Amino acid sequence: MIGPVPDAISRDDVIHVARLARLSLTDQEVDRFTRHLGDILTHASDVASLDLAGVTPTAHPLPLVNVLRPDVVVPSLDRQEVLAAAPAVEDERFMVPRILGEQA
Amino acid sequence: MNQALEIAKAVRAGERLASEVLEEHLDRIAAADGALHCFLEVSQDQARAQAARIDAAVVAGEDPGPLAGVPVALKDNFCTKGVPTTCASRILRGWVPPYDATVVGRLRAAGAVMVGKTNMDEFAMGSSTEHSAEGPTRNPYDTDRVPGGSSGGSAAAVAARLAPLALGSDTGGSIRQPAALCGVVGVKPTYGLVSRYGLVAFASSLDQIGPFATSVRDAAATLEVIAGADPADSTCLERQAPSLVAVVDQGVQGMRVGLAKELIDGASPEVRKAVEAAADALASAGAVVEEVSVEACRWGLSAYYLIAPAEASSNLARYDGVRYGLRMPAADVEAMNTATRSAGFGDEVKRRIMLGTFALSAGYYDAYYGQAQRVRTLVLEAFAAAYGSFDVLLGATAPATAFQLGAKMADPMQMYLSDVFTIPSNLAGHPAMSVPWGVGADGLPIGVQVLAPALGEEAMFRVAAAIEEASPPLAAPELVPSEVPHGR
């Protein structure tokens, strides 16, 4: 199925995808990204408007199959080394600010 | 000249010390890299220790390996234990990985000496190395020009002879395009030939690791070292590394070479002329050269700029300020994620994350991402048809020689067009490489691209070697000494 191709992306669309992607944008950035994304999507309209009914999509160049290894314990990364790279740590765990909606 | 293999030969024979070779290159980096900015990190302590191990092995009568004592530069998206790995992004500034990428271990086991980490477009998104949070790399042939990208630091380092070898990653041309613009050999192998374990992911169905070198033979030797099955990467093919150095001199007698119309149309007249001259040289060397059309390549660029951002938007979700990298303070976790990502990513990365999120979002998925995946099928079918009649295809690597710094920064679509000839091989998972063919009117290098079907590296390297043999001479760039010493 080929849906109708929007002419370009709207400001509201950009604000929406920025929120989904956990990015906050200034008004100027919204303007700039709306223009840039619109240019790219307009260029991509050559693909969006092709009649490709019946063509199987390709997600990956290889025919991917599950790859299994023997179920044996092997050394993993050193805990202290990994935690040393974290912005905040408590009791050998990653520490984060409170989760939204939780009581502080 | 095979710089890397000659160093290895001399070091293995005990005629040169790996430590001396290393110091010569560290001196060159110190002298030139202030002006070029190829390196984000020069790891001289680790390098000196590795060189000393190589020299001790030679004294002990052991063979340190096929790349003994050869300095190698790594793009900064390869994880290197104990050496910062930043992807030229603020969000990873100062991050020190707790493990090595598979290719890093393989290079070390082969006797190579890692000298440092090279500049790149942030998270490998770009075609000029200007999208680096640490500032651009400059083209050694003209420091007002870009080196290409995203592996621009690796390409420029090899061109400037700061290292005889480097590794990069190629998602849409990020090895081949800078190789062309800097006048060196750059190879994107078949998808799955080289383990991606420890390569920071950009677009996982497209990313592949490959070498930069000053000769086809050096590049072949490097690919032999890094290729081969790896249990740590489930997309890595279960096969041994191909024998490439052994075949590069076999010539092209009787080989069928297709001059791909869609991979030349739109190139500047001098680039087109270079590709045609390379085709003539192959014909003179005994190959059968004919024109061929691979029409679906016309849509490759559009498909790529939907697929790669879609995969990137998913891959880069991991940068959330929780386990590593930057964290911006905020009252709750979602605000922290948002503040961190907004401060940590540059404009191009944000653009691609949003483009990918949009292409995958409800209501647009089928029109954009779904269509792009169907075009990917068309590209594979078009190549399959062409390879029914030809062993390799020939085209341009980049549409023109290196452009001025800043020339395409305001218009992302113009920047993306730099990759128009390199993208189809990534969509197909096929190997392709760039080989220098002289210079344009501006004195800047031109690259010719050789493409082959999946696992067609042997044919590709044979043709590349024949092109190299016939190509006009390309002098190494004259380096301008830095005013500010760098890296030591």
Image (cartoon, coloured by chain):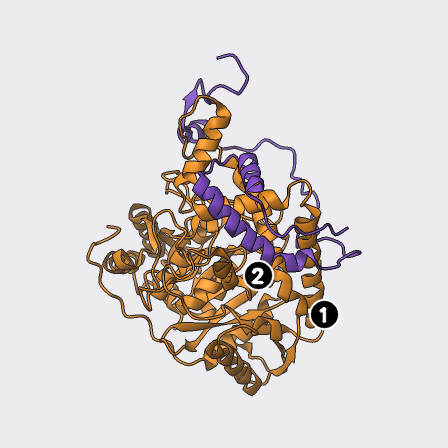
Chain colours: A purple, B orange
Which residue is at a point 70% across and 75% down the rendered structure image? Answer: B389
Q: Position of residue B360 (x, y in %)?
A: 64, 43
Label 1 vs 2, first from the N-terminus: 1
In the rendered image, which residue does mark 2 sit on? Answer: B423
In space, the residues marked 1 and 2 are separated at their CA atoms by 18 Å
* Residue B247 in view in this figure: no
In the rendered image, which residue does mark 1 sit on? Answer: B385
For residue B429, which quarter of the picture? bottom right
What secondary structure is marked by label 1? helix
Report the chain holding disc 2. Answer: B
* Residue B159 in view in this figure: yes
Q: Are marks 1 and 2 on the same chain?
A: yes
Q: Is there a contact, CB below 8 Å, between mark 1 and mark 2?
A: no
Characterize the local packing of mark 1: few (<14), some (14-19) or many (20 or more) Cα atoms within 10 angstroms.
few
What secondary structure is marked by label 2? helix
Q: Position of residue A84 (x, y in %)?
A: 40, 29
Q: Position of residue B5 (x, y in %)?
A: 41, 66
For residue A16, which quarter of the picture? top right
Characterize the local packing of mark 2: few (<14), some (14-19) or many (20 or more) Cα atoms within 10 angstroms.
many
Q: Position of residue B237 (x, y in %)?
A: 63, 53
Q: How many marks?
A: 2
User: In front: B357, or B453?
Assistant: B357
Report the chain holding disc 1. Answer: B
What is the three-letter code of the residue carrying label 1? Ala
Residue at the farthest top position: A103
Residue at the farthest right position: A54
What is the three-letter code of the residue carrying label 2? Ile
Q: Is residue B36 left or right of residue B472?
A: left
Q: Is residue B238 left or right of residue A91?
A: right
